[in-house]
Image: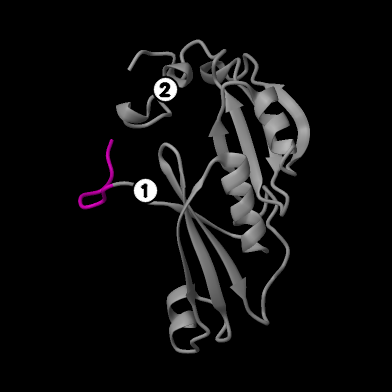
Amino acid sequence: MSLPKGFRYVDHVAFTVPDLTEAVTFFVDALGAEELYRSERGPDADFMPEHFAVPVDARLELVMLRMPPNLNVELFQWHTTDQRRDLPRHCDLGGHHLCFAVEDVDEAVAHLQAHGARVLGGTKEVGPDSPVVAGNRWTYLQAPWGLLLELVDRSRVKNPPPLVGPAEWADPAVTGKDS
C-alpha cells in the first residue's frame, strides 16, 4: 500500500500549546529537538477565520522543530478572546498523543520526569491477548502543560510489526533486524 498519487510523505504534526516557550524548552531539552524556524501571523479578520477556522481576533506564534530521525513537530500558541482552555482527554474528540519508541521505558520515564513530565499509572506490558505485540512495554505521561506522551519498548516482542518506516530510519534495536 502507498500514499495516493502525488502525495510524498507526512511532513509534520502540530500541537497547540498554552505557553510556546515552555513547550519549545521541553521538546529541545527533554527530547533533543532542534528549532528550525519561528513565525507569527494575525490578527487578520479576513485571512485567519477563512484559512484557519479561528475567531477574527486570533493571532498565532509558531515554532517548527525537527525530532530526529524522522519527524517535524510544529508548536502553535494562539491568542484570541474566544479560546477554549481545556485540553481534550484521550477519549475526547480531538484527543491525541505523541509516541516515542525507546530502548528502556524505565530510563525514558526517569528522564522525562526530570523535565517535569508526570507518569500516568506506571509501566505496563502487553500480554498474550494481543499476540502481535505481546511483550511490548509501554506507559503514558503528560508533558508539563498536559500533552499526552507515550513511550514504547518493543525489544521483548518476538516478531514486531514493521512500524518503523523506510530502511534508513530502521534501528536494529527497534526492528530486531539488521538494516
Residue designated by label 2: 171
In terms of image quadrants, where is residue 18? bottom right
Where residue 112 sits in the image (x, y, percent)? Answer: 69, 37
**Which residue is at 67% across, 24% downward?**
107
Q: Nearer the viewer, mark 2 or mark 1?
A: 2
Q: CA distance from mark 2 to mark 1?
A: 20 Å
Query: Given the image, on which type of amino acid does mark 2 rest?
Result: Asp
Q: Which image quadrant: the C terminus?
A: top left
Work out whether residue 103 or residue 140 is closer to the camera in this orientation and state it. Answer: 103
What amino acid is labelled 1 in the image?
A: Val
Q: Is residue 4 magenta?
A: yes
What residue is drawn where x is 67% and y is 74%? 83
> Which numbered marker is on residue 10?
1
Please rate how many residues cluster around mark 2, counting C-alpha atoms within 10 Å: few if below 14, some from 14 to 19, many from 20: few
Name the quadrant of the N terminus: top left
Q: Position of residue 158 (x, y in %)?
A: 50, 10
- Residue 66's disc number: none
Give the magenta-colored segment's residue range.
1-8
Tell me which secondary structure the magenta stretch mostly adopts.
loop
